[in-house]
Amino acid sequence: MGNKISNFKNNKNIIVVMRGTSAVTFHKKTNLLVQNIQSSIGPVNINYTTRWLKKEDGIVVPGHIWIEVSGFAQSLEEALVPFANASLTILPILSISANAAISDPNLEIGFDNTKGITERDYFQCYIPPENNEIYNLRCINIKATIALLDALDKHLDKERLIRAANQYRLALDYWRLGRETLSLAHLWMSIEALTKTKVRAECKVRNLKNEKELAAAIGINIENLDPYIRKELLLKGDNDCYMKAKKASDGFEHGFLSYKDIIKSSKDVRRRMAEYTRTAIIELCELEEDKLNVLLTKPFNKPLGCWPIVKYLRGKLIGKGDQLAAEDNAYPFMKWKPTIKSASVNKNGQYNITIKDSIIPELGQGISFKPISREIWQAD
């Protein structure tokens, strides 16, 4: 996406490092380098990868997404926020490519990396280390992602497509049971952002000059063109999906619909809306067919949120007495101690992680716990 960035006289070489939770991961020793991205103070190079963490017995597991931004600035303080913000512009494309959520990363480290000097400014923000919680994970296809970035970079509607992709990323950030309304709201905003791009694409296909000619060719009034484009082209003529999504989005935004009705409509169409929206963004980028097929088939055709795997424990408290909690505890409690026993990644980028849970009851005198079931759920 560009060439090596150039230094300017008296500027310092600054490196800014960010990290955060992400369902998008990279294979060990792989990365995506995006060059010559414009920040508010000048061009930067951005490197995206995954932190791989050594656990007990030499087991290595994926951690946070890791982002390194390098460029030139007059000072570290001047560079921190602009460099960090520049890195965020690529996250929607990574999220669209893998169809997986990336939470907003945190700025952790910044330092002066200028060669040949003896005193350098340094900055660090404390971010808690990754723990043993297991998140939904999906390995990104780097070749297809590079093709998507290149196609987007050449597109006349680049900024609009990036806005739509970012709304899709935000929708995936809420991809969890109980958050359907917020997901759908962002998906609808993504469809709205795509409308004019689809209008222009349709004019090009039909060899028409403008929206007025397109409306006439379709046989509708100009004021009905945008709704037509959304329902018939972006949502593939799915009237049920269009009506429920629009009703839920408008009702949520303007407050005229009960929360119960909004939730119901959101649950009914969220998956379909996600598929239509992501497909439209990728198709509008005009990728070559082989890369298009990679991104629209398994495993990338299924949205993946970035939430810990949920674990439930069910059982019975056994024993005489009404003091159920241990001394100094407010409630009866089971202390979980997860240990990662094995971790591997297959050739398709699927992660297999085995965890052993030690469960220690903290209960009142004479009270014991009889387990009935342990359940593990992937957030959906």
Image (spheres, rainbow, N blue to C red):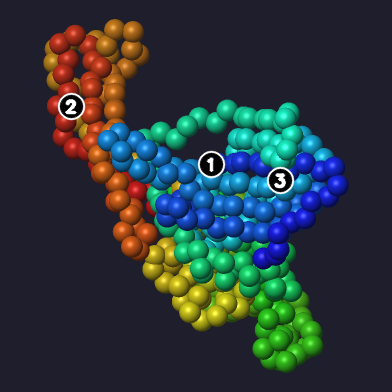
The residue tagged 1 is: 20
Q: Amino acid at mark 1?
A: Gly
- 277 up-or-down from 258: above or below: below
Q: Is residue 207 left or right of residue 370?
A: right
Query: Residue at image x 37%, y 59%?
Result: 349
Q: Nearer the viewer, residue 108 or 117?
A: 117
The answer for how far apart the CA atoms under marks 3 and 2 are is 54 Å
Residue count near mark 2 (Cα–Cα under 10 Å), binned few <14, some 14–19, many ≥20: few
Residue 73 seen by the camera: yes
Q: Earlier in the sequence, mark 1 or mark 2?
A: 1
The answer for how far apart the CA atoms under marks 1 and 2 are is 38 Å
Query: Residue at image x 51%, y 51%?
Result: 49
Q: Position of residue 12 (x, y in %)?
A: 77, 41
The residue tagged 2 is: 316
Q: Nearer the viewer, mark 3 or mark 2?
A: 3
The answer for how far apart the CA atoms under marks 1 and 3 are is 16 Å
Which structural element holds mark 1? strand
The residue tagged 3 is: 83
Q: Residue furthest right?
A: 9
Q: Position of residue 181 (x, y in %)?
A: 53, 52
Q: Is residue 100 left or right of residue 205?
A: left
The tag on residue 282 is: none
